[in-house]
Amino acid sequence: MEIKAVNHVALHVADVRQSCDFYTGILELKPMPRPAFDFPGAWFRIGDSQELHLIGHRRDTVQSHSRGTHFALHIPDIREAEKELQRKGVPFHGPKLRPDGIWQIFIQDPDGHYIELCEVK
């Protein structure tokens, strides 16, 4: 079996509209067409070929942590991301330098899912 890339990340969310506002307003992801499933959700483009899928009707507590379940987004400039998050009033942890020289910032979406923003040179 050959794995070529990550196609998408799916997150279970309580309020699709609130999550859409976060992912478009804070992270500036672009919405994309979604098939007519029989449950609420939304899809977003990440980069050229990856996607974020939101799935509605989450009722269980989210179990997420920066050192546990999270996903990471590659960004070009950690300091610019820090300024942007401050300007938007988004709480975050970092920037912190990983032992391998990668800068990272952690934020949480409205459901408590952790998202790592990492500057990979």
Image: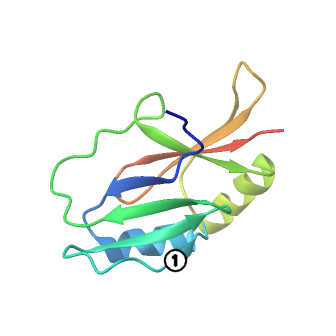
Q: Residue 24: x percent and y percent?
A: 54, 73
Residue 69 horizontal side relative to residue 75, left or right: left
Q: Nearer the viewer, residue 35 or 23?
A: 35
- Examine the rendered structure and indicate whether residue 95 appears above or below residue 14: above
Q: Residue 96: x percent and y percent?
A: 68, 32
Residue 32 horizontal side relative to residue 97, left or right: left
Location of residue 83 (image quadrant): bottom right
Q: Nearer the viewer, residue 97 or 8?
A: 8
Q: Residue 77: x percent and y percent?
A: 80, 50
In this view, the residue farthest toward the front is: 1
Residue 13 horizontal side relative to residue 42, left or right: left
| Colour pattern of the rendering | rainbow
Residue 67 horizontal side relative to residue 101, left or right: left
In this view, the residue farthest toward the top is: 99
Residue at (40% x, 77% y) in the render: 34
Location of residue 4 (image quadrant): top right
In this view, the residue farthest toward the left is: 59
- Examine the rendered structure and indicate whether residue 74 appears above or below residue 69: below
Label 1 CA crowd tier, 10 Å (few <14, some 14–19, many 20+): some
Q: Amino acid at mark 1?
A: Pro
Residue of label 1:
31
- Does dot 1 land on a helix, a strand or a loop? strand
Count the labels in the image: 1
Residue at (21% x, 46% y) in the render: 61
Q: Nearer the viewer, residue 100 or 111?
A: 100
Q: Residue 60: x percent and y percent?
A: 16, 49
Residue at (67% x, 38% y) in the render: 104
Residue at (84% x, 38% y) in the render: 121
